[in-house]
Image: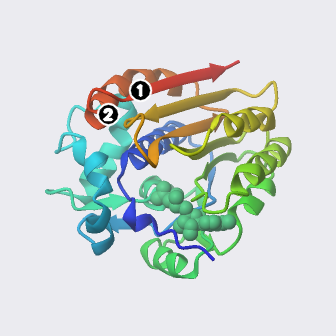
Amino acid sequence: MFGYRHAFHAGNHADVIKHGVYAFVLNYLQQKPGALEIIDTHAGAGLYELDSAQAQQTQEWRQGIGTLPWPAEHWPQLLQPLAELLTHINPEQLLRYPGSPWVALHSLRPQDSLLLCEWQQAERRLLQEQCAHPGVRSVQQDGLELLSAIHAKDRVRQLLLVDPSYELKTDYQQLPQALAKAVKRSNTACIIIWYPVLSNRDCRPFVKALAQASGHNAKTLHLQHLPQPGAQGMQGSGLWVVNPPWVLAEAIDQAMPWLNQCMGAGIGKWSLETSP
Ligand SMILES: C[S@@+](CC[C@H](N)C(=O)[O-])C[C@H]1O[C@@H](n2cnc3c(N)ncnc32)[C@H](O)[C@@H]1O
């Protein structure tokens, strides 16, 4: 049913923004001792080799993580947690790139839990091998069903990453529907949603649907980055965040000129909106 393999795309410009923000939010939430429930609804395989046949075929990482200075020193504050993880898994050369499961696994504390959801059997098998840890559970389930079924728990904060491959165009309708249910059931969960900006699809109706699904009173943040405006295919990506930590907008604002210079080669564009 699905042909998407994240190994072809790992470390591309969209991953750098997504994982930079995800790692920053995790780091911020883990500054408090209370338990954190982390749910990754579309987890992928977990960890990627940048010299694998798949990565070699597309070379997408060269326009993403490959454009940032290495070793990862003097990166902006937003990217510090990701830089720390990258340095940990690449003591010398940049050869490995963490998927979102590894971003969360790296900072998991005994009081936290990590639920990884992946629909494809082959990807899930890799995920289980790469993320074997007592605090981690993986399931083969529809990630959007999981999102719509979350519920608030006493004294446990929640962080969700929702990162579909959008192979099914129905994801564009079903994701806002699932989000609307999720925010009703758990109105304090921090939910990070990724979407692609494609040359052949107007993403504005989807963003509008996300805004409606989040509810009028919800705090939201919308970041869009187009490192390759006007290019055919994926020009960039967006992040829609419900209940962002208050420090996130400022950190993004500081980091984006630097990131855009690296990955957007002087022609990239970005925008950041927060509400209320
Ligand atoms: C963009 S990739 C995930 C990348 C990963 N979140 C990361 O940042 O490293 C999307 C993944 O979702 C999986 N997938 C597609 N439809 C799904 C569904 N309905 N439920 C759960 N996983 C799904 C795909 O097999 C693919 O591995």
Amino acid on which the number 1 mark rests in the picture: Lys
The image quadrant in which ligand 1 is located? bottom right
Q: Position of residue 224 (x, y in %)?
A: 51, 32
In the rendered image, the vertical position of residue 273 relative to residue 184, given as above or below? above
Residue farthest to the left? Answer: 92
* Label 2 SS: helix
- Position above or below: 272 against 107: above
Instruction: Tell me if 215 is positioned left or right of 41 in this view.
Output: right
Rendered location of residue 264, percent (x, y): 32, 33
Please give the residue where the numbered disc 1 appears in the rendered image.
269
Q: Residue at horizontal 33%, vertical 70%? A: 54
Q: In the rendered view, tell whether residue 249 sits above or below residue 7.
A: above
Separation (CA) of disc 1 from disc 2: 7 Å
Q: In the image, residue 22 lies at what x, y percent?
A: 50, 44
Where does label 2 land, which residue? Answer: 264
Q: Is residue 49 visible?
A: no
Looking at the rendering, in which quadrant would you find the N terminus?
Answer: bottom right
